[in-house]
Image (cartoon, rainbow, N blue to C red):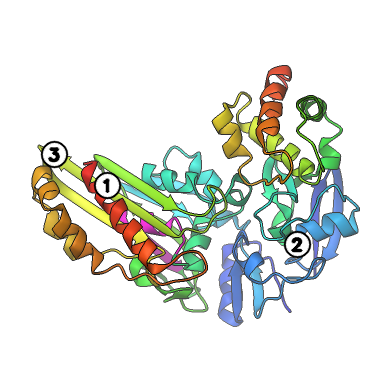
């Protein structure tokens, strides 16, 4: 095996262009998924590029009303950074544990592409754009076009996640909820993210997403658009109809963590609770 | 294989190993720091906790290649500090140690928490220690011990 620790982003891009590598950042998913016996090396089926310490990927800046987060920023660094969007802070607070958050990176949570990745529902409704780089080009993809299934991404093998761009917006309500078996270090049974902007009792912006209830995070922009312009009272009067409409798109599965009935019921209840809080 | 240099318990060290080796195995097998325990092996129990640049990590899932140039402290290194003495005494006084397997990790987690927040509330202690499991004490004594250490060690963190 050829496991390498390149020193610069450029060196990384050249290696990615020449070979078939798995990119490893903090390792909090990959080191566990590929673990072997004690005192033996993890069994990876590809050569590994370790990118955790690449200086070019560790930054957070605000430019032109858009936040730019380098992909190897750790969750703990983001948790305590003043520029991190509040909703993302709410999610990170209940992700894993301090020890994991010190290694886990935001780019890694995207790269792992788990339906239960807790930063993902947040990134979906903040309209995050993922900047992907290869030796020949840089391109940008909305996060929902990047993740297409459990562990499946539209990233080519010579590309790396360089940055997460988040347009700054103002909301009057934000919400992140997670249901798991333990408060810390649990993989979500269901997660929910919601943001809304209400002015003069009228819904001006409304976005919600659900994690761990489908092969990817579930967000439906058409249904969100339907409630824009409603008064908060109208929305509450018609809440059952709205819940039913969103419910049609929530089709969870049974697995070792939970079952589909529970997941669907709780997902809808979390949406209900968010709407009633507006 | 790669040559990886880092500081381990205040000593410069260099080792030639695969960068994907688990830091835990290197610490226990190559450097004999067996105070670092393997519990779950998947980042959920905190028995393998060590400090990298003063921050807690689970060494069972840290790839060796990520620690190049970093400062690593295990329970053996931490035990030479005044802060450890205060924490250890508080753990003893409050009955926060029973079988002892989780204790090195608990002390590392306490140190990492107090480095960030020298006077945590009970809730903040629970969050700070949330990645560390103890199957003996029921946690109350550990929380009390951290609180007592933060008071008695005022100014150390």
* Residue name at image x 82 percent, y 60 percent: B25
Image position of B15 with respect to B114: above or below: below
Check the residue under mark 3 and report the chain it is in: A
Check the residue under mark 2 and report the chain it is in: B
**Mark 3 lies on residue:** A199
* Same chain, labels 1 and 3: yes
Front-most of A113 and B8?
A113
Q: Which mark is residue A274?
A: 1
Q: Earlier in the sequence, mark 1 or mark 3?
A: 3
Q: Residues within 10 Å of mark 3 (few under 14, many from 20)?
A: few
* Same chain, labels 2 and 1: no
Image position of B141 with respect to A64: above or below: above
Q: Is residue A120 magenta?
A: yes
Q: Look at the image and tell me whether residue B65 can be seen.
A: yes
- Position of A35 with respect to B75 (left or right) is left
- Position of B99 with respect to A89 (left or right) is right
Label 1 or label 3, whichever lies nearer to me, is: 1
Where is residue A176 drawn, in percent x and y? 37, 48
**Mark 2 lies on residue:** B22
Q: Which residues are magenta?
A: A116-132
Circle 3 SS class = strand
* Same chain, labels 2 and 3: no
Check the residue under mark 1 and report the chain it is in: A
Q: Look at the image and tell me whether residue A221 can be seen.
A: no
Q: Residues within 10 Å of mark 1 (few under 14, many from 20)?
A: many
* Label pair 1/3, CB-CB below 8 angstroms: no
What is the C-alpha distance between the residues marked 2 and 3?
Answer: 53 Å
- Position of B52 with respect to A120 (left or right) is right
């Amino acid at each position: 095996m050829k496991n390498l620790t390149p020193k610069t982003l450029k060196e990384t891009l050249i290696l990615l262009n020449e070979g078939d590598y798995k990119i490893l950042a903090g390792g909090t998913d990959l080191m566990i998924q590929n673990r072997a016996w004690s005192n033996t090396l993890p069994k990876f089926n590809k050569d590994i590029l370790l990118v955790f310490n690449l200086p070019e990927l560790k930054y957070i800046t605000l430019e032109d009303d858009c936040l730019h987060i380098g992909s190897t920023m750790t969750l703990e660094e983001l948790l305590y950074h003043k520029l991190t969007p509040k909703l993302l802070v709410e999610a990170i607070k209940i992700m894993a544990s301090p020890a994991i958050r010190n290694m886990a990176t935001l780019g890694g949570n995207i790269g792992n592409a788990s339906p239960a990745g807790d930063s993902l529902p947040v990134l979906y409704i903040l309209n995050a754009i993922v900047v992907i780089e290869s030796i020949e080009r840089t391109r940008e993809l909305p996060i929902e076009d990047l993740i297409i299934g459990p562990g499946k991404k539209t990233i080519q093998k010579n590309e790396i996640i360089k940055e997460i761009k988040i347009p700054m917006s103002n909301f009057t309500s934000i919400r992140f909820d997670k249901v798991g078996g333990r408060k810390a270090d649990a993989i979500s049974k269901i997660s929910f993210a919601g943001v809304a902007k209400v002015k003069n009792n009228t819904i001006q912006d409304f976005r919600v997403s659900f994690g761990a209830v489908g092969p990817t995070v579930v967000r439906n922009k058409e249904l969100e658009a339907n409630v824009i312009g409603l008064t908060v009272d109208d929305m509450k009067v018609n809440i059952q109809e709205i819940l039913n409409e969103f419910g049609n798109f929530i089709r969870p599965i049974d697995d070792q963590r939970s079952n589909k009935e529970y997941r669907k019921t709780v997902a809808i209840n979390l949406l209900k609770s968010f709407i009633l809080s507006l | 294989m790669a040559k990886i240099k880092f500081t381990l318990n205040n000593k410069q060290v260099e080792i030639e190993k695969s960068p994907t080796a688990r830091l835990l195995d290197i610490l226990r097998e190559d450097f004999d720091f067996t105070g670092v325990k393997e519990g779950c092996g998947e980042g959920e129990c905190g028995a393998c906790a060590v400090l990298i640049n003063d921050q807690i990590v689970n060494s069972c899932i840290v790839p060796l290649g990520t620690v190049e140039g970093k400062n690593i402290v295990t329970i053996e290194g931490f035990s030479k500090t005044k802060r450890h003495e205060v924490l250890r005494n508080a753990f003893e006084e409050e009955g926060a140690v029973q079988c002892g397997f989780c204790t090195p990790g608990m002390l590392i987690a306490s140190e990492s928490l107090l480095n960030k927040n020298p006077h945590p509330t009970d809730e903040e202690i629970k969050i700070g220690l949330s990645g560390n499991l103890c199957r003996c004490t029921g946690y109350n004594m550990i929380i009390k011990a951290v609180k007592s250490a933060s008071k008695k060690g005022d100014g150390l963190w």
